[in-house]
Amino acid sequence: MSNDSVNLLLVEDDAVDAERIDRALKGAKIANPIYHAWDGVEALEMLRGTHNQKNVPRPYLILLDLKLPRMNGHKFLEEIRCDPELHDSVVFILTTSDAERDKVAAYEQNVAGYMVKSRAGDDFLRLVALLDNYWRIVELPPNK
């Protein structure tokens, strides 16, 4: 699977953080399609193909904030892990929460990694490098 074929779904309600991530990806010359959902409800619609404007094709990686309106990140994780079509989704947490309970709950839902925004750096370069290396090396689940 090539890096060019991986789609990125960013589930983030903070427009400034979303823009920082987008700029960091473009600055690193990563041209993979980036889809943006503002909360867990919209992200589920995009993954299930029921969104009225945008749907995320496989293969994809999900960057998920935990503190979201309507459906928070923990509930979103529960939903996709119970869904037979989405249970194998690769999810990275990118959040402001450094709380131990949030980390434990996320890893109990089989996330690929947990990153605290304040430690990712102002320009998110480490995050971009991690994602770039991840999808170049790791074999993602095949299209269904």
Image: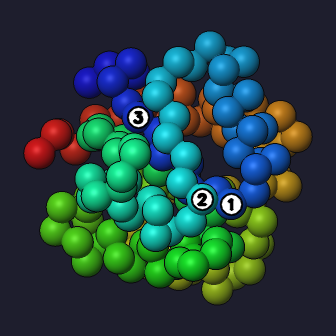
Kindly state the secondary structure of the residue where label 3 is placed.
strand
The quadrant in which the C terminus is found is top left
The CA span between labels 2 and 1 is 5 Å
| Secondary element at tag 1 | loop
Q: Residues within 10 Å of mark 2 (few under 14, many from 20)?
A: some
Name the residue beneath numbered marker 1: 13
Q: Amino acid at mark 1?
A: Asp
Residue at left offset 33%, top offset 24%: 5
Instruction: Indicate whether 3 appears above or below 19.
Output: above
Observer-nearest of 29 and 71: 71
Quadrant position of the N terminus in the picture: top left
The reply to whether discs 2 and 3 touch (Cβ–Cβ < 8 Å) is no
The amino acid on which the numbered mark 2 sits, given as a three-letter code, is Trp
**Dot 2 and dot 1 residues touching (CB under 8 Å):** yes
The quarter of the displayed image where residue 44 is located:
bottom left
Q: Nearer the viewer, residue 77 or 22?
A: 22
Q: Dot 1: within a 10 Å radius of its alpha carbon, few (fewer than 14), some, or many (20 or more) residues?
A: some
Residue 82 point in image, percent of width and height: 25, 77
- Image position of 108 (left or right of 116): left
Residue that numbered label 3 is attached to = 7
